[in-house]
Image (spheres, helix red, strand yellow):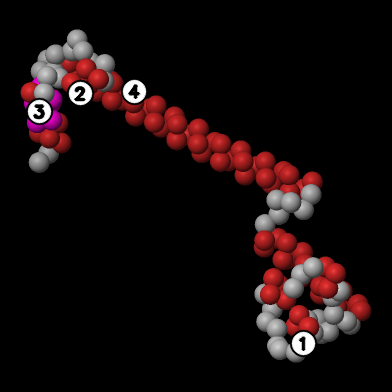
Amino acid sequence: MDRNRREREGRRKRRKEGGKEIEKRGRKGKREGTREGKEGIGKERRGRKEKERGRKEERKKKGREGKERKTREAGKNSEGKGRKEKRREFWELKSTHLKTLKQPLPLSLGLSARKLGNTTTPGKPHGVSPHPR
């Protein structure tokens, strides 16, 4: 069934119900069959579509603003940094530390091996070997 026919049948049903649907959408004075009526339908529908599109755009803009704000704030303090970035920083720190001192990182950094993603072997504290990776 093509779209025109489906719409026509829908209109017929609505007319049988006493034009409830038509009135609800602000087409009270429009007669369905006439050209004027058809124009009204299209116009009203277009208005609604545009409104929805506007809302969608608003949402997108809000999302973008939020992202920008987060990146701005990330410069001020370590909050707002992503997990990947934190890990990258840590690994840089760790490699330089191990190269210079040839000893494992102090655990005071509060980063356990599990968080770093290196596996521990049983019996070794935090699985941090004194060899630079």
For the residues labelled 3 and 4, the Cα–Cα distance comes to: 24 Å
Name the outermost residue toward the right. 101
**3 or 2: tag closer to the N-terminus:** 3
Asked if the residues shown at circle 4 and circle 1 are in contact, with their CB atoms under 8 angstroms apart, the answer is no
Q: What range is drawn magenta here?
A: 8-15
**Percent of width and height locating residue 12:** 8, 26
Amino acid marked by disc 1: Lys
Amino acid marked by disc 3: Lys
The residue identified by callout 1 is 124
The answer to which quarter of the image holds residue 111 is: bottom right
Amino acid marked by disc 4: Gly
Asked if the residues shown at circle 3 and circle 4 are in contact, with their CB atoms under 8 angstroms apart, the answer is no
Q: Is residue 8 visible?
A: no
**Which SS does the magenta portion mostly show?**
helix
For the residues labelled 1 and 3, the Cα–Cα distance comes to: 77 Å
**1 or 3: tag closer to the N-terminus:** 3
Q: Nearer the viewer, mark 4 or mark 1?
A: 1
For the residues labelled 4 and 1, the Cα–Cα distance comes to: 68 Å
Q: Nearer the viewer, mark 3 or mark 4?
A: 3
The residue identified by callout 4 is 47
The residue identified by callout 2 is 21
For the residues labelled 4 and 2, the Cα–Cα distance comes to: 17 Å
Q: Quadrant of the N terminus?
A: top left
36 or 23, which lies in front?
A: 23
For the residues labelled 1 and 2, the Cα–Cα distance comes to: 74 Å
The residue identified by callout 3 is 13
**Percent of width and height locating residue 48:** 34, 26
Q: Quadrant of the C terminus?
A: bottom right
Residue at (45% x, 35% y) in the render: 56
**Percent of width and height locating residue 15:** 10, 22
Task: Please say if 82 is above or below 18.
Answer: below
